Image (cartoon, helix red, strand yellow):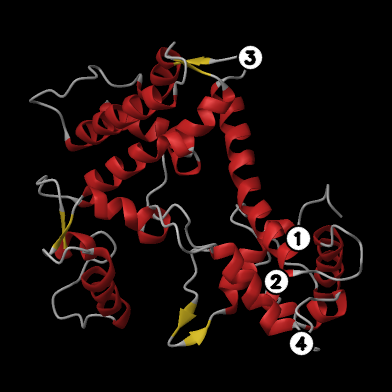
Amino acid sequence: MFKLLVVVLSLLLVSALPKEENHKDRVIDRELSDKEHFQNEQHNPEYDHEAFLGEEAKTFDQLPPEESKRRLGLIVDKIDKNNDGFVSREELKDWIRFTQKRYISEDVNRQWKQQNPDNNPTIPWETYQKLVYGFLDHPAPQPHDSEEEKTYKAMRTRDRRRWTVADHDGDDNLTQEEFSAFLHPEEHEHMRTVVVQETMEDIDKDGDGKISLEEYVGDMYKSEEGDEEPEWVKSEKEQFTIYRDKNGDGFMDEDEVKHWILPEDFDHAEAEARHLIYEADQDADEQLTKDEVLKKFELFVGSQATDFGEALARHDEF
């Protein structure tokens, strides 16, 4: 019976619970795409078109080249805020950030409607936990719990803690703004302690309060017997030794994890804007015309063999 309930509620849980994370997702000022920025030491254009179009893409449409170029031209007009016929680095950076924030806003609105269909001012914890975890016979861990039950009870415990931190006024009800902090804690300053704590719990498998090199690598790569270790794993090990483990004791403590996932000295949107201008700026004037963008069509939106992002398929924009 429990397994049947798990299947029935799986779609709800997918929308309500945090997504599975990898190392890129853990970093708050995270990469602009889940594509590798470089593959075999060559630049990967799929990273650029996802960064440009945004993480908000949930579905992808394939468009004829002429139509997608037309829509790309309309996007360029949107980016050129001062209507001077040029896209500056600041305008491009602002657009890249906008596409990232739009995904967050749309996700919050969607889940708010799903879990609050009457559009009440707040969602009480009891309402949320009954909707998402009401299938659990008993919320506390029990000796006879199956592995599925243990997993969902652990998720419920994490959600309860995160809910409490997101609840600014302590009334155990979340406004839509507080609900946004609950769903996307990485985007809210007061939630960052929770993000660090959850990251530690995810990676620290032996529960000793610190992250070893093996745990760090194991969070993103599971080797099979006889497999040759990929180059990117070797690179991650170097990252751990040189940059993550700042005191050189062979582990990452909570403070080192905080420095890792809350970087202060790198702006991905700024770096991507600089890169796109470098690649497309034919006359080297440090800004882009619409013609320069369209001539680098594949850099910004891929090709017909590549999925075009949802930003090109939004009927309300074109």
> Residue 284: which disc?
4
- Give the label, 4 or 1, closer to the camera: 4
In percent of the image, x 16 and y 24: which residue is there? 141
Provide residue 55's location: percent of width, then percent of height: 58, 56
> Residue 256: which disc?
none
Provide residue 158's location: percent of width, then percent of height: 30, 32
| Residue type beneath disc 4 | Ala
| Residue type beneath disc 1 | Leu
Q: Decide which of 71, 92 is in the foreground and name it.
A: 92
Q: Decide which of 234, 4 is in the foreground and name it.
A: 234
| Residue type beneath disc 2 | Val
Q: Is residue 30 left or right of residue 94?
A: left
> Residue 312: which disc?
1
Residue under label 2, please give it: 301
Provide residue 25's location: percent of width, then percent of height: 42, 55
* SS assignment at label 4: loop
Work out how far the residue at label 2 is from the one at label 1, CA to CA, in angstroms: 9 Å
Sequence order check, earlier mark of 4 and 3: 3
Sequence order check, earlier mark of 3 and 2: 3
* SS assignment at label 3: loop
Label 3 environment density (alpha carbons within 10 Å; few <14, some 14–19, many ≥20): few
- Give the label, 4 or 3, closer to the camera: 4
Question: Does the residue at mark 2 contact the one at mark 1 (Cβ under 8 Å)?
Answer: yes
